[in-house]
Image (tube, rainbow, N blue to C red):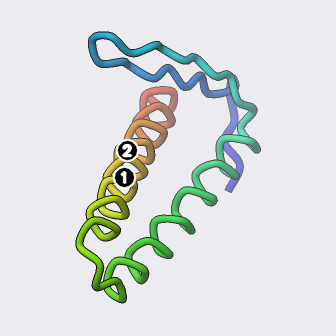
Amino acid sequence: MGHDGPAPIVKVEASPGEEVMELTLSNEEHELLVDILEHRRRELTKEISHTDHHEFKVGLRKSEKLIESMLSRLRAEVMAKAS
């Protein structure tokens, strides 16, 4: 599971009016963050399917989309470093 090379730098692009956050992670921290996010995404999928309350479901879906976006960017960073 380990990646060689320099630690990934996660730079979150912000929408207008939002702050930007830059986070430097070791490879081990990067892998852990991806694992945590993937686990939470799986939990959210189950939670969404069992939720009847519309507003709550909308909030869960929003969280799911944010996690998917974060995972995409984290994976893209690793792919960019690998090439």
Kindly identify the residue that appears in the image at 27 percent across and 11 percent down. Answer: 16
Instruction: Count neighbours of disc 1 (C-alpha within 10 A) and say few if under 14, some if 14 to 19, many if 20 or more.
Output: some
Camera-nearest residue between 28 and 4:
28
Q: Nearer the viewer, mark 1 or mark 2?
A: 1
Along the line of sight, the residue nearer the viewer: 30 or 14:
14
Q: Label 2 is placed on what type of residue?
A: Ser
Distance, label 1 to label 2, CA atoms, is: 6 Å
**Residue at 44% across, 71% down:** 44
Q: Is residue 73 above or below residue 80?
A: below
The residue that appears at 74% across and 42% down in the rendered structure is 29
The image shows residue 74 at horizontal and vertical percentages of 48, 39
Total numbered badges shown on the rendered structure: 2
Q: Quadrant of the C terminus?
A: top left
Counting from the top left corner in percent of width and height, residue 24 is at 68, 22
Q: Is residue 80 above or below residue 62?
A: above
Q: Is residue 5 above or below residue 1?
A: above
| Whole-percent x, y for residue 72 in the image | 37, 44
Q: Is residue 33 shown left or right of residue 29?
A: left
Question: Which quadrant is the N terminus positioned in?
Answer: bottom right
Residue 13, picture quadrant: top left
Image: 14 above or below 37: above
Look at the numbered discs 1 and 2 and tell me whether their residues touch, using CB distance below 8 Å.
yes
Amino acid carrying label 1: it is Glu
Tell me the number on the disc at residue 72.
2
| Residue position for label 1 | 68
Q: Nearer the viewer, residue 6 or 18?
A: 18
